[in-house]
């Protein structure tokens, strides 16, 4: 589909009937119709996401997830489902809810691991575990999340992408960035 940039073009879609027709075309795989919907609603969806997600890259990834869901779900859209704009904004709300649900789960998991590490007697192994926990705590939430899915839960990149609700390439990028950050943190902490 190529890279699309959100633009604000509300005059492109001035009637719900027009949007419904565009969604029907998107459901049949019409990329031009999809680009029109994206051009009309991309900026609005991004603004909605940015009100809850302050990290620009993460917000953009969530917007991408919303429009992937539109692309994949347009075939199932029916007029009796209500206003098409509300349908699209509903997808956005669901993606945001999924995101915050994942963040809460990760915080719970990381918190329980940190408590277990701190409760153990101090040994060189315990010190190493504590250093790992502190380094992990310094990572952005989305990077910690994919590390947890892949290294603790043993998921493949494809499974982790499905669980996180992001593309597989995004999972790979997050893992790579997290490992580089962890490496730099450990090099700093072990250097004289």
Image (cartoon, grey):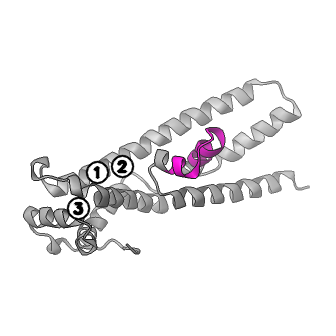
Please determine whether, in this image, residue 71 is positioned above or below residue 13: above
Q: Image quadrant of residue 10?
A: bottom left
Lower sequence index among marks 3 and 2: 3
Q: CA distance from mark 3 to mark 2?
A: 20 Å
Per the model, the C-alpha gap separating discs 1 and 2 is 6 Å
138 and 87: which is toward the camera: 87
Residue lying at the far front of the rendered structure: 28
Callout 1 secondary element: helix
According to the image, label 1 marks what residue? 91
Q: Is residue 184 left or right of residue 88?
A: right
Tell me what residue is drawn at x 52 percent, y 57 percent. 168
What residue is drawn where x is 50% and y is 36%?
Answer: 105
Rendering coords of residue 14 (x, y %): 10, 69
Residue drawn at 55 percent across, 55 percent down: 171
User: For mark 2, what is the residue?
Assistant: 95
Q: Residues within 10 Å of mark 2 (few under 14, many from 20)?
A: some
Binning the other alpha carbons within 10 Å of mark 1 as few (below 14), some (14 to 19) or many (20 upward) gives some
Quadrant the C terminus occupies: bottom right
Q: Which residues are magenta?
A: 144-161
Q: Which residue is mark 3?
A: 27
Q: Residue at x 26, y 67 (%)?
A: 29
Between the residue at mark 3 and the residue at mark 1, the CA separation in whole angstroms equals 16 Å
**Mark 2 residue element:** helix
């Amino acid at each position: 589909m190529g890279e699309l940039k959100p633009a604000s073009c509300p005059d492109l879609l001035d009637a719900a009937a027009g949007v419904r027709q565009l969604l029907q075309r998107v459901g049949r795989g019409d990329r031009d119709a999809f680009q029109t919907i994206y051009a009309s609603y991309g900026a609005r969806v991004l603004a909605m996401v940015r009100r809850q997600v302050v990290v620009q890259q993460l917000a953009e990834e969530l917007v991408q997830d919303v429009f992937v869901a539109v692309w994949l779900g347009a075939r199932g859209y029916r007029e009796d489902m209500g206003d098409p704009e509300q349908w699209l904004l509903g997808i956005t709300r669901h993606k945001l809810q999924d995101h915050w649900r994942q963040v809460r789960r990760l915080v719970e998991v990381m918190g329980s691991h940190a408590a277990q590490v701190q409760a153990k007697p101090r040994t060189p192994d315990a010190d190493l575990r504590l250093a790992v926990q502190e380094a992990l705590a310094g990572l952005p939430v989305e990077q910690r999340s994919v590390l947890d899915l892949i290294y603790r839960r043993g998921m493949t990149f494809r499974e982790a992408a499905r669980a996180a609700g992001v593309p597989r390439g995004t999972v790979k990028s997050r893992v790579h960035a997290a490992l580089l950050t962890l490496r730099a943190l450990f090099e700093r902490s072990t250097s004289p």
